[in-house]
Amino acid sequence: MSGTFVLAADPMLAGDIGGVEVLLTLVKVVVAFAFLMVAVMLMIWFERKLIGGMHQRFGPTIAGPFGILQTLADGIKLFFKEDLVPDRSDRFVFKLAPYLSLIPAFLAFAIVPLGGDFNNGGEVEWWGRTTYLQVADPPVGILLFLAMSSVAVYGVMLAGWSSGSKYPLLGSVRASAQMVSYEAALGLAVASIVLVTGTLSTHDMVVAQAAEGYLGIIPRWNVIVTGLVPFIVFMIAGTAELNRPPFDLVEAEQELVGGFHTEYSSIRFALFFLAEFMNTITMSAIIVTLFFGGPAGPVLVSEVGGVGVAWAWGLVWFFAKLFVFLFCFVWMRATLPRFRYDQLMDLGWKALIPVALGWFLFLTALEVGRDQGWNEAAVTVVSLLVFAAAGAMLMRAVRSGRRARDREAAQADEPADPVGGKV
Amino acid sequence: MAELVFLVAALIILVGAVGVVASRNPVHAALFLVQTLVGVAVLFVLNDAHFLAAVQVVVYAGAIVILFLFVIMLLGVDKAEELRIEPIFGQRPLAAVVGAALAALLGTVVIGGADVLTGLRRAGGDRALDGDTTDIERLGRVLFSEYAFAVEITAALLTVAVVGAVVLTRRASHSDGSTPVDA
């Protein structure tokens, strides 16, 4: 057993850990949890209201001003509903599954830097302790997010299986296949970020993005540094990972009743609902952290009445950026029709993963070229040629695979499926 | 502190390990396996092997056991097993013998210390972590310099395995004349 036992890169936890440190950490956890709960409540209301607006209807209007308390009313109603456990269910797993969805959703949020003045390293000093405005900054950083998103698959998968019913099982198999597939693209997009920032820690990623930008006005955000492609891949794969529209085949009502949570009622259903929206908020926060500089931004007023408020501007910028992505997720839900299952798998495996991998290799080539002092233009041209050749080969492979399938279908005396022969 | 964490993690691992063997339902066994894997990840963190801990959760819990569960659910063996029938004759006595041998081996190691069997005092030796570099930096450097060839070979092996699996499934579909099932 080593004596050092590094828990996090947070300077507060580097030295001796006494009462104040434990208290500060607890306060951070409670604040983050409370924030997520309130944010979920407002997010559900916001989503319903916004979709209502986009559909030219009102959305919730009755409970509270602008219907803002609608979620609270719904939550109270769900609490007092009868809690059903289906007869043919696996009782223990059935009860465990909602927590397996909820807890990873919250844990992933712990690594998001929420505030701080990143023009000066993003540290804050409270009660004589220097610390970060994030719950935890583990050395594996962003890998924790990937780990949590892979644990979250269990919640969905086990919920469907343990219900002991047909449609939930189909829904959960679909959902877990989808989540596992898109995790690969998600990971490759994250790898590009890790490559350009040279760190796994989310705090250090924000520090890297807070550095001097280009031409004095364009910030050094990773969305620009990595050249937009990883961001697009991450955004699409993230939406699929959340099972949100247009990737919500998991709960395609026309086919699967309600998907994996069909048999859930009362508070357990509420937990799934909570987890879903928590995941949306966490995903938006992670996108902001990885690609848009997190809380980094200019400090407009550094003091109010002699009290330094530079750190609070981090919060302001973070929430402003977060809001943009929450809006985007709702916007996509209101706008885009649902994918078909084969389209979903084609997009994941034949488009997103190759593009993410190719772009990652391209960034690596640029990095190596910079180290070796090669001509950047030559590296780019050669990389693009290799990119094009690999793309052509992949397209050819996909085409010949489809042709072989059609031929076999014809041989088996079945009419060839007009949409490509897939279920 | 470290001892307490170790005790809790060890308890989680052991309960999980016993559960894998003892549960009659394959899905429950897979879940106990996840519990063991997560416990081992905690032990990795305790030994400052943060990267290994993350990989343990992402790869083993997040991918491999999920695949197990897929197979269990697709084959429809997710009901409690009938354990009175012995699938292969003589399997149970043989299992007892092998189990006893393994127990003897582990007992020797526990009583005699790790160097009894290998002559090594501890793994890693001079590669133990110093304070300056994190485990992921070390791992990256070693993997892509000293063991670069091994990494490449492993990658090639995995590719061959994937290609082999695809070829095998397509042959099978030709022989009975039906269309291949693809997801």
Image (cartoon, coloured by chain):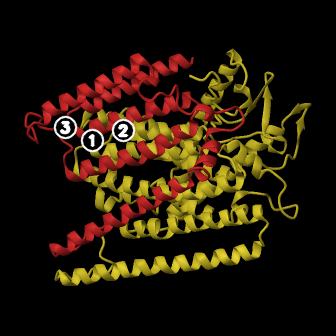
Chain colours: A yellow, B red
Residue type highlighted by circle 1: Ser
> Which chain does tag 2 point to?
A
Give A382 or A280, whichever is nearer the viewer. A382
Across and down, in percent, residue B101 comes to: 26, 27
Q: Is residue A62 visible?
A: no
Residue corresponding to mark 2: A97
Across and down, in percent, residue B35 comes to: 38, 33
Across and down, in percent, residue B134 comes to: 66, 38
Structural distance between the alpha carbons of marks 3 and 2? 17 Å
Residue corresponding to mark 1: A162
At mark 3, the secondary structure is loop
Mark nearest the camera among 3 and 2 is 2
Give B149 or B42, whichever is nearer the viewer. B149
Mark nearest the camera among 3 and 1 is 1
**Horizontal relation, residue B111 to residue A118: left or right:** left
**Horizontal relation, residue A256 to residue A386: left or right:** left
Residue type highlighted by circle 3: Asp
- Look at 40% across and 25% down and name the residue there: B12
CB under 8 Å between discs 1 and 2: yes
> Which chain does tag 1 point to?
A
At mark 1, the secondary structure is helix
Across and down, in percent, residue A23 comes to: 66, 20
- The disc, 3 or 1, on the residue closer to the chain's N-terminal end is 3
